[in-house]
Image (cartoon, helix red, strand yellow):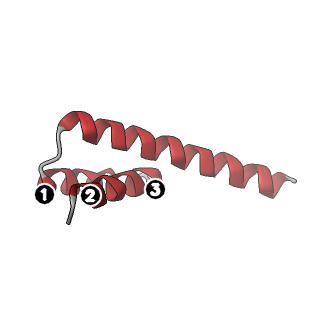
Amino acid sequence: MSRTQAIALIKANAAKGDIRTCTRIFVENRISRAVYDQAVADGRAFGAFVAKRDAARSAA
């Protein structure tokens, strides 16, 4: 798995709230902690955005 793919997977799993998988990908691919922390933050922010968007759609 390439570094770019690993970071994308960390973001996707963080958006779903699956930190165990994020950590596994982080360890297996030896990504720096700063990059990992940023990817998790980006994923969580995207997950929150999607949740708000879906809540607004169901309310309308």
| Residue occupying the far top of the picture | 34
Q: CA distance from mark 3 to mark 2?
A: 16 Å
Looking at the rendered structure, the secondary structure element under dot 3 is helix
Q: Which residue is mark 2?
A: 6
Q: Nearer the viewer, mark 2 or mark 1?
A: 2
The residue shown at (22%, 50%) is: 23
* Circle 1 Cα neighbour tier, 10 Å, few/some/many (<14 / 14–19 / ≥20): few
Q: Which residue is mark 1?
A: 28
Q: Which residue is mark 3?
A: 16
Looking at the rendered structure, the secondary structure element under dot 1 is helix
Q: Position of residue 16 (x, y in %)?
A: 46, 56
Q: Earlier in the sequence, mark 3 or mark 2?
A: 2
Number of labels in the image equals 3
Q: Is residue 50 left or right of residue 13?
A: right
Q: CA distance from mark 3 to mark 1?
A: 20 Å
Q: CA distance from mark 2 to mark 1?
A: 9 Å
The residue shown at (61%, 45%) is: 49
